[in-house]
Image: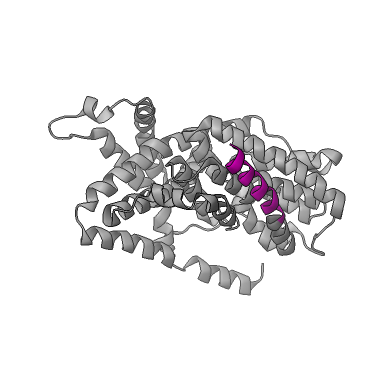
Amino acid sequence: MTTANIVTDAKTERRMNLPLLAIVAGFCAALLYDLSLFDVMFAAIADAYLQVSTFVAGTLLLFFMAERAFKFDLTTALAESGKWQVPLAAALGALPGCGGAIIVVTKYVSGRLSFGSVLATLTATMGDAAFLLLAKEPLTGLFIIGLGFGVGVITGYIVDAIHGPDFMRPKNTSPASHPDLSDPEHEDFSNPVLDKVWMLIFAPGLILGLMLAFQIDVDAILATENIPAPASLLGFIGGMLCFGMWALPRLLPQLRKQKTDIAGAENETIIRRTIADTNFVTSWVIFAFLLFEVAIHLTGIDLKSLFTSVAAFAPLIAVLIGFIPGCGAQILVTTLYLSGYLPLSAQIGNAISNDGDALFPAIALAPGAAVMATLYSAIPALLISYGWFFLA
């Protein structure tokens, strides 16, 4: 990396996230406008943590432990997989999160994989939204992951048959020229003590979340004279801790750590990875919950009726949102579906069209291929989502 690039990266590192600041300021202004919103926000943040974050963290722990236990040389497997490249790439993309899809993109640029493999992995991936869906509706999550894998394999083979394996591959480009492919969205503020506090809250939070999932009124059981809603209080504290750890480096850039490359990221502990990814998902879920609850409280609009009135456009809107790089917007779509505001057809369309965080390195390494793969993935996304909409 040149000195000029280092200076540019340093300036970028010090830049405050102004959209995030505007969002936080907007919610604070709404609270000052109507103090009764505190109860609404308190409940929304508590629900986000107890009903979503605890299950996301539990799913991540199991996934990361399995990933480490069954680890094998993906690079060699992909390079030597021959006709099985497309299904293997789709399988990597179907894994919750974006790590597998990022590996496929980098290997395509180095000349070891076909364009169909890239299309297969980007079509199959749901990114971090998969963790949220698996935590709340595991059967639906498994169905959509399986559907994405199948669609990815079929489209990958079709595109390779039409265009050949080297279609859209950039010339004289290698992953080595882009050493930092880690996702800055998952960077958070942490230290060993803070991580221990996080885990201490998560342990009882998961138990409370499971009780709530079985429709047990935990607050009524645990209430005391001084603390009438202990479960909700724990959920609020846990939610604010997750959000604070994720937001602080973005609002106070001096708290950001030095970026790590992929090798460094692989050496992170399972606990640290779980905390960082859960904080990211939780923050977006909190935004979604607050947006809906505050909007309903201030305007009295029935959002469910509003989305129902434009139901025919819901799959198209969800597919278009899938074009947005990153996982934040996709988590919002999944939250809308889980809240009953969007039909399953829209969730299916978004899952197939979205590329998660893998689109960032794809744009950096092979922008033409990234755009083409995104456009190609929209075709099955629209066909299947609208097929489900009209036939289901």
Relative to 160, say whether 50 is above or below: above
Quadrant of the snapshot with the C terminus = top right
Quarter of the rendering containing residue 266: top right
Quarter of the rendering containing residue 237: top left
Near-viewer residue (300 or 280): 300
Q: Residue at x 71, y 42 (%)?
A: 151
Q: Residue 300: where, in percent of width, then height?
A: 29, 53
Relative to 101, say whether 325 is above or below: below
Q: In the image, is residue 99 part of the stretch drawn in magenta?
A: no
Near-viewer residue (358 or 377): 377
| 330 sits to left or right of 293 | right
Q: Can residue 165 be seen in this view?
A: no
Q: Which residue is drawn at 61% across and 51% down?
A: 354
Q: Residue 340: where, in percent of width, then height?
A: 43, 41
Quadrant of the snapshot with the N terminus = bottom right
Q: Residue 234: where, in percent of width, then height?
A: 29, 37
Quarter of the rendering containing residue 215: top left
Q: Which span of residues is magenta-colored? A: 376-392
Q: Which residue, as the protein is rendered here, is positioned at the far left? A: 225
